[in-house]
Image (tube, helix red, strand yellow):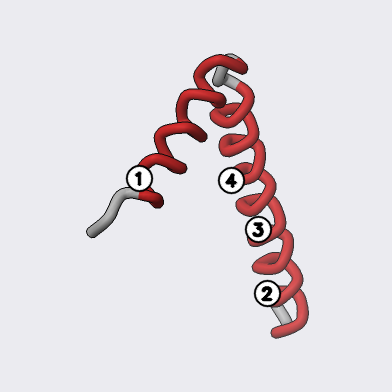
Amino acid sequence: MRWWKVLGVAGLAGVAATGVVIARNERRRRAYTPDEIRQRLHDRVNESTEPR
């Protein structure tokens, strides 16, 4: 194989792997209910405003 073929196959593998990671993160994000998201946001705000 020539180097450009290897580079092309590696590029395609990288694009496929990135798509898998994005799809997995999207499924995880969509699994939250609106109430869970609201509670998590409130928790993050409370953590950031607590004195250290």
Q: Earlier in the sequence, mark 2 or mark 1?
A: 2
Identified by mark 3, the residue type is Ala
Residue at left offset 63%, top offset 24%: 30
Q: Which label belongs to residue 13?
A: 3
Q: Residues within 10 Å of mark 1 (few under 14, many from 20)?
A: few
Foreground residue, 32 or 3? 32
Q: Which residue is mark 1?
A: 47
CA separation in Å, label 1 and label 4: 29 Å
Identified by mark 1, the residue type is Glu
Q: Which residue is mark 2?
A: 6
Foreground residue, 14 or 2? 14
Q: Earlier in the sequence, mark 3 or mark 4?
A: 3
| Contact (Cβ within 8 Å) of mark 1 with mark 4 | no
Residue at left offset 62%, top offset 42%: 20
Question: Compared to 44, does 4 lie above or below?
Answer: below
CA separation in Å, label 2 and label 3: 11 Å
Residue at left offset 50%, top offset 19%: 36
Question: Compared to 14, does 16 lie above or below?
Answer: above
Residue at left offset 31%, top offset 49%: 50
Q: Residues within 10 Å of mark 3 (few under 14, many from 20)?
A: few
Question: Compared to 46, does 2 lie above or below?
Answer: below
Q: The C terminus is located in which quarter?
A: bottom left
Question: Compared to 25, does 13 lie above or below?
Answer: below
Instruction: Give percent across and percent down for residue 48.
Output: 39, 51
Q: Quadrant of residue 27?
A: top right
Q: Earlier in the sequence, mark 2 or mark 3?
A: 2
Instruction: Tell which tag, 2 or 4, sits nearer the viewer.
Output: 4
